[in-house]
Image (cartoon, rainbow, N blue to C red):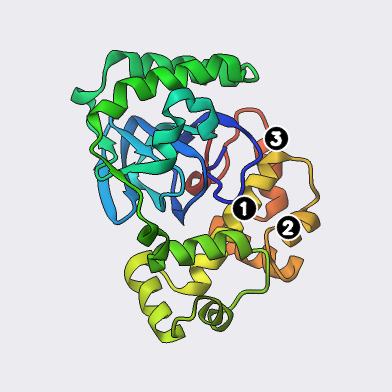
Amino acid sequence: MLPFFENRNDSFSASVAENLTFPLHQHGHLELFYLLDGCAEVTVRRQAKRLEKGALAVIFPNQVHSYRSEPSGSRAALLISDPTLAGVYGGILLSQHPSDPFLPPELLHPNVEYALQEILKESAEGGNDGVCGPLLQLILARVLPGLPLHQNLSSDSLDLTYQIVHYISNHFRDSLSLDSLSRSLGVSKYYLSHVFSEKMGMSFPEYLQSIRLNCAVSLIAGGEQSITEIAADSGFESQRTFYRAFRARFGITPLQYRKRLLQPGRQAPEEFHAI
């Protein structure tokens, strides 16, 4: 399971993500990232933090965020939930955000790790919202008092990074270019190039291709579509372009990746191994 960022259809998902690296993205779900082992850098809004074992990142809906595992590796419990499962806390999640969304191990109540482990067990057995919802609410009851919360402002949605991520999240399947993005956002393409370089850490083509490859990997893991359908649904203009980009990123073809996932005891390429 990957932290996919467009309109999600599932109400709740949980898994153990290994060596998770994912570019800036956003969606309307709550996301919890709990380090089980290793270290990872998590960015939420404009704040980046190096998290170690036992630390928790609480990412409210519609907050731009990213993950970068350190070379030494990391394992984390990753929970993504519709705010409706948060019960009485749903209103807080949708109307506010924490200025500091990171909690170190010493500030976490023991209930948090217990509830996370129970959610992972339940999800491994098929998942039940009636069970996962109350466990999620237990986590929120323990962590929200420790987070400095601030009211969302209308100006948040005017932030250029938010606008870029939001637009590409909804249009990455289309034929996008820096020129078309510039016209849609009403911002000079030269300034956009600067934003990608300074805030995204990569060029526009690199970011767009990364988003499309992330989508493709999620679809391959689903195992239901053909590679040709996956290439088209991920926004690649041709299957040849998709194969070339995929091999350059992972060192194997999409078909080889799928076969590796289906082989017992075999792992996907380490850069994108999740679950």
The crowding category of the residue bearing disc 3, from other C-alpha atoms within 10 Å (few below 14, some 14 to 19, many at least 20), is some
> Is tag 1's residue or tag 2's residue first in the polypeptide sequence?
1
Q: Identify the residue at horizontal 52%, vertical 45% (top origin).
A: 28
**Which x, y percent locates residue 137?**
43, 21
- Residue 188: image quadrant is bottom left
Given residues 228 and 121, the one toward you in this image is 121
Residue 54 visible in the shown view: no
Residue, disc 2: 233
- Give how far across and how far down residue 245 sits, in percent: 61, 65
Question: What residue is pinned by disc 1?
Answer: 215
Please rate how many residues cluster around mark 1, counting C-alpha atoms within 10 Å: few if below 14, some from 14 to 19, many from 20: many
| Circles 1, 2 touching at the beta carbon (< 8 Å) | yes
Establish if 167 lies above or below 3. Answer: below
Which of marks 1 and 3 precedes in the sequence? Answer: 1
Indicate the quadrant containing the N terminus: top left, top right, bottom left or bottom right: top right
| Circle 2 or circle 3, nearest the eye | 2
How far across and down, in percent of the image, does residue 34 sit? 36, 31
Amino acid on which disc 2 is placed: Asp
Instruction: Please tell me whether mark 3 or mark 1 is closer to you in this view.
Output: 1
Which mark identifies residue 262?
3
Lateral position of residue 107 relative to residue 208, left or right: left
Gap in angstroms between the C-alphas marked 2 and 3 = 22 Å
Q: Report the side of 165 relative to 144 (left or right).
A: right
The residue shown at (73%, 50%) is: 255
Image spot of residue 142 (x, y percent): 31, 20
